[in-house]
Image (cartoon, grey):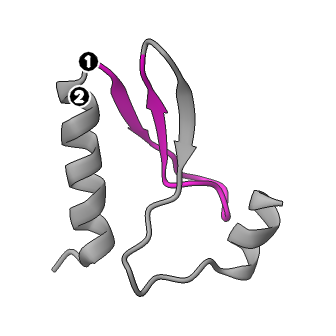
Amino acid sequence: MPGPEATIEKYLKQKVEEAGGECLKITGERGLPDRLVVLSSATVFVEVKSSSGVLGDHQARMLD
């Protein structure tokens, strides 16, 4: 069963697409953000966390 982060990612993807953008899933390298959001006004990396989520060491290093 999908966890809270999967629910948040689904919601994010839906809202970005409704705004005319793309919400691409990033895979392959540990520590990378979950999504790349591309809108006409901005392109941003998004790390999705539930309210109880915590950054892992590899994610914190990537953020730095």
- Label for residue 20? 1
Type of secondary structure dominating the magenta stretch: loop
CB contact under 8 Å: marks 2 and 1: yes
Magenta includes 58?
A: no
For residue 35, which numbered disc appears in the image? Answer: none
What residue is rendered at 64% in x and 55% in y? 32
The part of the chain drawn in magenta is 20-39
Q: Position of residue 5 (x, y in %)?
A: 33, 70
Q: Position of residue 62 (x, y in %)?
A: 77, 60
Residue at the image position 45 percent from the left and 34 percent from the top? 37
**Position of 45 compared to 50: left or right?**
right
Which of the 4 image quarters holds residue 45? top right
The residue under label 2 is: 17
- Residue visible at 24% across and 23% down? 19
In the image, what residue type sits under mark 1?
Gly
Q: Nearer the viewer, residue 61 or 27?
A: 61
- Picture coordinates of residue 42 (x, y %)? 53, 22
Assign a secondary structure to mark 2: helix
Q: Is residue 55 above or below residue 48?
A: below
Amino acid at dot 2:
Glu
